[in-house]
Amino acid sequence: MNWQPANFDNVEQLQKCAINNNVLANNYSAVNSILYGKKFNSSISINGGWIFEKYYKGKCPVYCFPHNIEGDNSELNSALNLIVEDSKEYGCELKFRNVTEQQKDKLLQFLKNVEVIELPELSDYIYLSENLAKLPGKTYSKKRNHVNQFKKKHPNFRFEKLSPENLDAAREVENTWLSESIENEDKNDSLADLQNEKLMIFEVFDNFEFFSKTCGMSGGIVYEEEKPFAFCLASELSTDVTDIHFEKCISPFAHDGGYAIINMEFAKTVKTKYINREEDLGIEGLRKAKLSYYPEMLIDKFLCKII
């Protein structure tokens, strides 16, 4: 198998694969495969119409579940056999990570002596786009109140779809957000993680038109008069799902409800049925925030290892 880091030449195949498999989980996003490749030391192999992906923990590989580019899984066992053979050269136990419930069941049918470990910190939060856009009924009354309070305090805010014309304003928000996070010594992220995230975001900005054409990249930015204070970046994960990759809001707007504003205003522009707001990473505050928007479903993830 020929392994190499995912790059721009692979994007169209990665995106086609995600669409044809009606992917819900964000770790199979073409955009995430490109952006997080360096962070997780991951690589892909395109072999016989299948996309394989692995990353390394030390010297040992950890595999993702393989996907057929055309969505035809009739030869899944053959694809899994390729992974089994590839893993033998490392002398490590075979591991699959970010495995969904359905994928886990298929692995249990194919492999023996599988230990399954649930990874709740990696569960994807999936919402109805309409709910995030309209905040309907009693369920969302607190969220509507929060939004209304923001509008009362900041009556001159405005939302724009992200475009090449306002990317510099979004860069300004990211730079300010990073400075604030460093100053506040955010304990959830190391300085290196925050700086690497900025590099990923700027890579999207620098190639926004390319990602828009190949992956349905979109986003939004919010201003108060001429001052930008929040932005988000998203892409088309499948025909039914839009994946939110990044969402940032600076002070004092974040305290006033700026995240609720960018969340709602961008959701109004989304054409897919669902929005994936990705995982909570085991951060309690993030978990509570995601649950407060009442997800339609959680996509649970598992680690499967052969013992």
Image (spheres, rainbow, N blue to C red):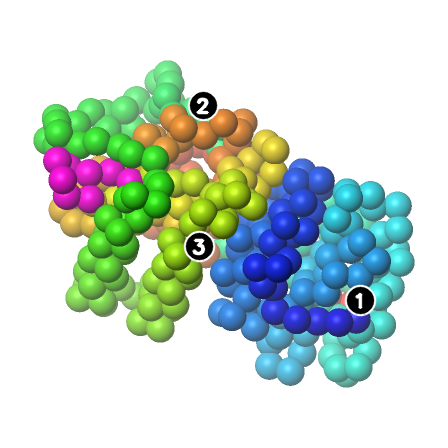
Residue 306 in view in this figure: yes
Residue placed under numbered mark 2 in the picture: 130
Q: Position of residue 40 (x, y in %)?
A: 54, 69
Q: Is residue 222 above or below residue 12?
A: above
Numbered disc 1: secondary structure: helix
Residues packed near mark 2 inside 10 Å, few (<14), some (14 to 19) or many (20 plus): some
**Distance from label 3 to label 2 (Cα)?**
29 Å
Image point (55%, 66%), residue name: 37
Which quadrant, please, contains the N terminus?
Answer: bottom right
User: Marks 3 and 2: CB-CB under 8 Å?
Assistant: no
Q: Position of residue 247 (x, y in %)?
A: 35, 47
Look at label 3 and name its amino acid: Asn
Q: Earlier in the sequence, mark 3 or mark 2?
A: 2
Which quadrant, please, contains the C terminus?
Answer: bottom right
The mark lying in front, picked from 3 and 1, is 3
Q: Which residues are magenta?
A: 221-228
Q: Is residue 236 above or below residue 207?
A: above
